[in-house]
Image: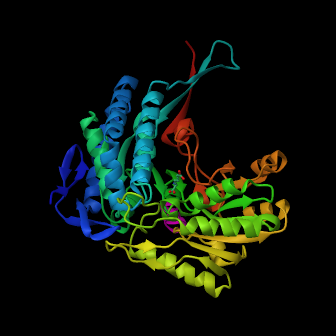
């Protein structure tokens, strides 16, 4: 089996080979991937610092060309890369291809943005003086990505980093190095100069920690858990470097009496269980008013019974496996906690045996849950959702906002009044009306409030807040 190596200063390097398992079939090894250490991080930072001198001053056409080529190749190879994604992460093939297309679109968007870099000229309050405001790259950006969107999240961090002239040290999730390696390989062949993008695969506790400890990294962008996010933020504050964190969610989907039932059921099932519920935008709290509650629960369970949980690569699968044994145990632990807390397990929650040995879990729905229960407050990150019954819209909004998180919030209603009020008063970074809380566009800002996000937004034009620093120049001609 060929070893996929780290990529440092334009060279493939590394010897320690770690197998990457397929969660749909643990007998299937997706590939062998190198594991880096602090020394590799130090070399990657040195290379990135050297490369920064030139890349920061590269012209828009050069950046455009590389990002454009990468986009073209990702889109051309979408079936193959989507399959790799489904095989290593456990999303269904359709979801894997969809995510790959999203990654291609992100590169395309930032290829365009590279040509649209512009500043502002402002008249000074002093006669004869000109003021101009420009954006410059931040420097070496450390990128730490999670396993649940193994191609889209690296894309939406790497593409803007390069677009705005930064160089990169990239550490992908240990569980999903395949897509990360493929993106780096594509960018290398798209003509990116050596040292501009460095890949160091391996453990968070080793490679991630070495990145946090290294003073040569100017900014760190991270997507992952709240606990790890806090560990990333603290040393960044200490060293006064820029940090951007995208963390968890406990996203509410409010369903009001006047909702279209089919729409509400579709939003709930998609938002809670698609991608095996492993999305920080997943709808894990279904907040439902009395009048529609029983119909809603009945229809959701009927719909859940029809979901095919199986090998991600198999035709007809709706829900792939949980990503690994640890996550599976976490999901099971929370299902037990929900029962102990007195919620009613209305459907699912059991392990499923399929043709191939994998981590198959029947999506679980709790009813009679309260917002105080741990299953309603803590992020589970699996196909587990709870229904919280409320009396009216006002109570639904209060419950929706009563959470340590604030990423995405949805409402299903036909009332313009309630939809508008919810949009304005929801304490979340993203609001969805008659749509699932998960599944976002690639060209608009992504991020949340409270414990969900820290620092500037990702994606779209808003990405430049993090990946650039502003310079105000005063000129007396
Ligand atoms: C989506 O819902 O389309 O890690 C994207 C996550 C998020 C991305 C969600 N950062 O789940």
Report whether residue 161 is seen. yes
Q: Choose top left, top right, bottom left or bottom right for residue 65.
A: top left
Q: Is residue 231 magenta?
A: yes
In this figure, which colouring scheme has been used for the structure?
Answer: rainbow
Report whether residue 165 is seen. no
222 relative position to 376: left or right: left
Q: Position of residue 194 (x, y in %)?
A: 24, 39
231 relative position to 418: left or right: left
Where, quadrant-wise, is the C terminus in this rendering? Answer: top right
Could you tell me which residue is drawn at 42 percent across and 56 percent down? 145
- Secondary structure mostly seen in magenta is helix
Q: Is residue 356 above or below residue 456?
A: below
Q: Nearer the viewer, residue 284 or 360?
A: 360
Could you tell me which residue is drawn at 19 percent across and 65 percent down? 16
Part of the protein shown in magenta:
225-235
Q: Nearer the viewer, residue 311 or 18?
A: 311
Q: Position of residue 407 (x, y in %)?
A: 63, 56
Could you tell me which residue is drawn at 57 percent across and 47 percent down? 446
Q: Position of residue 77 (x, y in %)?
A: 31, 41
Q: Is residue 50 magenta?
A: no
Q: Nearer the viewer, residue 474 or 411?
A: 411
Number of marks drawn: 0
Q: Is residue 218 above or below residue 127?
A: below
């Amino acid at each position: 089996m060929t070893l996929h190596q780290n990529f440092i200063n334009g060279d493939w390097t590394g010897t320690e080979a770690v197998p990457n398992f397929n969660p749909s079939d643990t007998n299937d090894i997706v590939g062998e991937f190198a594991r880096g250490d602090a020394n590799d991080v130090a070399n990657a930072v040195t290379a990135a610092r050297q490369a920064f001198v030139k890349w920061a001053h590269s012209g828009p056409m050069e950046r455009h060309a590389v990002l454009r080529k990468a986009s073209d190749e990702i889109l051309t190879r979408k079936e193959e890369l989507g399959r790799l994604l489904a095989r290593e992460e456990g999303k269904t093939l359709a979801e894997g291809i969809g995510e790959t297309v999203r990654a291609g679109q992100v590169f395309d968007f930032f290829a365009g943005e590279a040509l649209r870099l512009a500043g502002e000229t402002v008249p000074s309050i002093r006669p004869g003086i000109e003021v101009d405001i420009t954006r410059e790259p931040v420097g070496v950006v450390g990128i730490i990505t999670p396993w649940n969107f193994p191609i889209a999240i690296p894309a939406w961090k790497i593409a803007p980093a390069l677009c705005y002239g930064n160089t990169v040290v990239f550490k992908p999730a240990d569980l999903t190095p395949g897509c990360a390696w493929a993106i780096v390989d594509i960018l290398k062949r798209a003509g990116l100069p050596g040292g501009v993008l460095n890949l160091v695969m391996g453990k968070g506790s080793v490679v991630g920690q070495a990145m946090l400890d290294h003073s040569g990294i100017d900014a760190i962008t991270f997507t992952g858990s709240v606990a790890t996010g806090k560990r990333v933020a603290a040393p960044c504050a200490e060293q006064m470097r820029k940090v951007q964190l995208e963390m968890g969610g406990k996203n509410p989907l409010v369903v009001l009496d006047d909702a279209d039932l089919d729409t509400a059921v579709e939003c709930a099932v998609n938002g809670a269980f698609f991608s095996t519920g492993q999305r920080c935008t997943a709808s894990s709290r279904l907040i439902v008013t009395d009048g529609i509650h029983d119909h809603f629960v009945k229809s959701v369970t009927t719909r859940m019974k029809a979901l095919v949980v199986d090998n991600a690569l198999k035709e007809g699968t709706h829900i792939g496996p949980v990503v690994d044994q640890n996550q599976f145990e976490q999901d099971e632990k929370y299902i037990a906690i929900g029962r102990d807390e007195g919620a009613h397990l209305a459907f699912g929650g059991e392990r499923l045996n399929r043709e191939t040995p994998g981590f198959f879990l029947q999506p679980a729905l709790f009813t009679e849950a309260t917002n105080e229960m741990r299953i309603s407050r803590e992020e589970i990150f699996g196909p587990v959702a709870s229904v919280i019954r409320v009396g009216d819209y006002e109570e639904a909004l209060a419950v929706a906002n009563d959470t340590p998180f604030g990423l995405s919030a949805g409402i299903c209603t036909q009332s313009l009044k309630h939809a508008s009020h919810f949009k304005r008063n929801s304490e979340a970074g993203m609001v969805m009306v008659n749509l699932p809380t998960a599944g976002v566009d690639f060209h608009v800002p992504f991020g949340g409030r409270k414990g969900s996000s820290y620092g500037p937004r990702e994606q779209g034009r808003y990405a430049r807040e993090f990946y650039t620093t502003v310079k105000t120049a005063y000129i007396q001609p």
